[in-house]
Image (cartoon, rainbow, N blue to C red):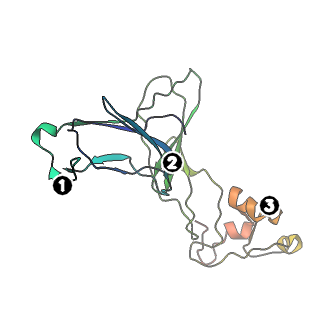
């Protein structure tokens, strides 16, 4: 929990029961606070959402009174609201380097900034994935986009398998493509990516590319 306010909504409503819908909250722990002139209620929320969304607090146009009366629309006098989204002021000193990561669904783009004034940052998102459906973060360098992560695929782009060769002697005698992990440790491959021999990278015979 960062202590950052994610979203705030103010409503001018009568003393009744009201329904709000909270959506688009990324995975993590949050504190929900409902406050009026007389009341204060807090609760902890745990979101298990996988994909990132845009946090939204939506007021249901139907509200219920305290005597359990049927749902009634808000009257004209009750209407009126305001919404405030989080704006993060980033403090920096001259010469600092800022690493910003833009996220949109499965896409991730990193930008490195050397700011000397306030500025607007725009992220370009591209589909950088392999035949195993691994999705990779890219980093924008000037006008170019580069992979920020090492490759983890076990298949060529055409779907054919790249053999996993564990024996070092056999690896040295190969004339075809292969992959392995550092010290043959699966955890190393998951965290840092696989290792590929020259033939896997340069396999142009039938037009098979890694990505």
Whole-number angstrom distance, CA of label 2 to CA of label 3: 27 Å
Which element type, helix, strand or loop, lies under badge 2? strand
Q: Which residue is mark 1?
A: 71
Left or right: residue 25 compared with residue 15: right
- For label 2, count other residues whose C-alpha is less than 10 Å away and answer few (under 14), some (14-19) or many (20+): many
- For label 1, count other residues whose C-alpha is less than 10 Å away and answer few (under 14), some (14-19) or many (20+): few
Q: Quadrant of the N terminus?
A: top right
Measuring 23% from the left and 37% from the top, which residue is drawn there? 81
Q: Observer-nearest residue: 161 or 59?
A: 59
Q: Quadrant of residue 71?
A: bottom left
Residue 76 position in % (x across, y down): 10, 40
Left or right: residue 82 compared with residue 157: left
Measuring 21% from the left and 47% from the top, which residue is drawn there? 65
Q: Which residue is mark 3?
A: 182
In this rendering, the count of numbered labels is: 3
- For label 3, count other residues whose C-alpha is less than 10 Å away and answer few (under 14), some (14-19) or many (20+): some
Q: Which residue is mark 2?
A: 109
Whole-number angstrom distance, CA of label 1 to CA of label 3: 63 Å
- Give the mark, 2 or 3, whose residue is nearer the N terminus: 2
Left or right: residue 74 compared with residue 109: left
Report if the CB atoms under discs 1 and 3 are less than 8 Å apart: no
- Give the mark, 1 or 3, whose residue is nearer the N terminus: 1
Residue 66 position in % (x across, y down): 23, 47
Q: Inspect this view and state whether residue 193 appears.
A: no
């Amino acid at each position: 929990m960062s202590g950052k306010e994610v979203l705030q909504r103010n409503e001018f409503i009568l003393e009744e029961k009201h329904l709000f819908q909270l959506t688009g909250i990324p995975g993590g722990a949050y504190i929900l606070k409902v406050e009026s002139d007389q009341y204060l209620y807090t609760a902890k929320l745990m979101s298990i959402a996988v994909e990132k969304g845009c946090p939204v607090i939506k007021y249901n146009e139907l509200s219920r009174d305290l005597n359990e009366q049927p749902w009634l629309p808000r009257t004209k006098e009750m209407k009126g609201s305001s919404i405030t989204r989080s704006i993060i002021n980033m403090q920096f000193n001259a010469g600092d380097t800022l690493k910003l990561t833009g996220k949109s669904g499965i896409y991730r783009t990193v930008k490195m900034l050397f700011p000397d004034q306030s500025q607007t940052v725009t992220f370009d998102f591209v589909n950088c994935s392999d035949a195993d459906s691994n999705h990779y973060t890219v980093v924008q360098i000037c006008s170019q986009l580069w992979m920020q992560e090492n490759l983890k695929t076990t298949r060529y782009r055409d779907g054919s398998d790249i053999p996993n060769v564990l024996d070092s002697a056999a690896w040295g005698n190969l004339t075809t493509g292969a992959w392995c992990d550092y010290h043959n440790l699966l955890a190393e491959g998951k965290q840092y990516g696989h290792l590929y021999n020259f033939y896997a990278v340069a396999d142009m015979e039938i037009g098979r590319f890694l990505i």
